[in-house]
Amino acid sequence: MKYVLKKLVTMLITLLCISFLVYLAFDIIPGDAALSALGTDVTPERLAAVREEMGLNRPFIERYADWLINFIRGDFGISYKYRVPVSEMIMSKLPVNVMMAVTAFIIMAAVSVPIGIYSAKHKGKGIDRFIIILNQIMMSVPHFFMGILITYIFGLVLKIFTPGGFVSYDKDPGGFILYMIFPCIAIALPKIAMSVKLLRGSCIEEAGKDYVRTAYSRGNNTSKVLYHHVLRNAMLPVITLWGMTLADMMVGSIVIEQVFNIPGIGRILLTSISYRDYPVVEAVIVLIAFVVIVTNFCVDIIYQLVDPRITMQKETLNK
Amino acid sequence: MQTKKKHSLNLIIGLIITCIMLFLIILGFFYTPYDPTKMDSSAKFAAPSIKHLMGCDNFGRDIFSRVLKGMGNTFVIALATVVIGVVSGVLIGAVTGYFGGWLDEVVMRINDVVFAFPSILLALVFISLFGTGKYNVVLALGIAFIPSFARIVRGEFIKYREMDYVKSARLAGVSHLRIIFVHILPNTMTVLLSSIMIGFNNAVLAEAGMSYLGIGVQPPDASLGSMLSEAQGYLFSAPGYAVFTGLMIILLVLGFSLLADGLKKG
């Protein structure tokens, strides 16, 4: 419990730091926010009025506190370019990205665990060698290139889906799922390779330990030892990797969106970057960072549930 | 015995791929079979042949020449990124790990915060504030990579600073600076070298991703990433363009990751 509390406090501080740093960066560097909202050809009186209205004359800390409170409430400010609330722009698109990341994550977990175990079980045989080589290659393929390859093979050659023909969920749920499965696979594939490699390695390492020999000597058969003893310990490093992976997949979905022409949060982010629409960029980045940090927190907690030794180890390590 | 053999095999294959890629990159700096920007309307979408090794793109530009140039750009950007990350990371990690104390606490907390942030996002913040372009990509990614190197180096320094040889060097009157750079740093090299290679790969992938999104290298400069985004538009008429360009990224990354693997275990 003390561990959970400590982690929770650390997480909150990290969240606060990140939001502060991002706000600070976007406050200082771009120059006058009122000027960038209005454009350069504006009368000084109008500029002064807008600055007052935007609250730019108040001290920085006050503005930051206001922004943070509004942010927690779900009000991310007004877009400079489109003049609509940022939350409206983002919140309608965010589910697409979250869904992509979560689906890719599920695919990864479902595929990599059996393959990793299988590979470790058949260590040194032909099939294991093949899996290792395939893994090594897969890990080197950037996910957006994987997306392009998938578009070419499944879209243009096999014609299973129409490239660029995204349909929204409300219009055609079947078509939506069929279309979305490909980008999700593109995101998942490199991560599958990574976790198979890690799981295989840690399974083999665990299998060589004394407690496994003891378990065998007590009359357990291979699969019993594997599933009851080895796997539980072998999964620990994999869980850590998965925690970081979910964050990567969130970010990856932003890139993959462009490959498959999916209207998601990434397109908003890219157009806002090119139009210097700072409230939008700020909101998207802080939001993704929040998702990432909260995920990491959850991973830490799950980790501790799986292996209570961690609490002690980490505490001694920190000293 | 058998496992030993396999690791060195990794190392050898990695070495071969990396050498070939480095040769192509260096070749690209001095010589390309065609001018990579010269358009030849008669060769539009030409298929791979002896004249055009990888065929031609939508403007009839030789893809092989363009890939050579693009690879050079990608390589230089990734290298510069890693240099920024490693030099700053080593300095921060060495000082904080060696001396410890409150400075260590503060720097590592800041590091934790930056580390919790996906590096591409950090780069995006940077790009949106300072604009796109080659140099900004290098700076953005370089800064984003500092924490991971600092972390590794710090861990190593904590391990070594309590060792007897360091203590006796200290007793013999060797200065802190000399201990850090002459006595401890060389010992961290094996760990550092393989993480440099992994970092290099991440830099290649991150740069390619950013240029693919159009927020990295800007035309007329080309990198493998920006070429891929261009090639995607002609996927139907000239699939070779995308495939060859992507293949180069894969080979570049594969070579270094095999090397890193081989070094770590061998």
Image: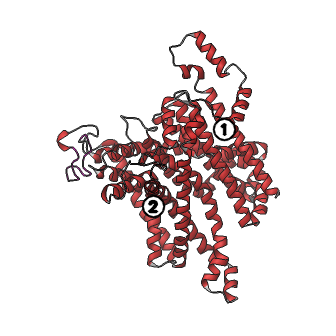
Residue drawn at point x = 66 percent, y = 49 percent: A293
Q: Which residue is mark 2?
A: A138
Q: Nearer the viewer, mark 1 or mark 2?
A: 1
Front residue (pair A53, B102): A53
Q: In the image, is A310 to the left or to the right of B73?
A: right
3D distance between C-alphas at marks 1 and 2:
39 Å
State the residue position of label 1: A74
Q: Residues within 10 Å of mark 1 (few under 14, many from 20)?
A: few
Q: Residue at x 22, y 49 (%)?
A: B52
Horizontal side, residue A200 vs residue A134: left or right = right
Image location of residue A267, percent across then percent down? 48, 40
Q: Residues within 10 Å of mark 2 (few under 14, many from 20)?
A: many
Q: Are marks 1 and 2 in contact (CB under 8 Å)?
A: no
* Residue B76 in which image quadrant: top left
| Residue lying farthest to the front in this orientation | A171
Residue visible at 58% across and 68% down in the picture: A199
The numbered mark 1 sits on a residue in which chain? A
- The amino acid type, in three-letter code, at marker 2 is Met
Q: Which residues are magenta?
A: B44-59
Q: Residue furthest left?
A: B42
Residue B55 colored in magenta in the image: yes
* Amino acid type shown at disc 1: Gly
1 and 2 marks on the same chain: yes
Rendered position, A126 above or below A307 = below
Q: Secondary structure at mark 1?
A: loop
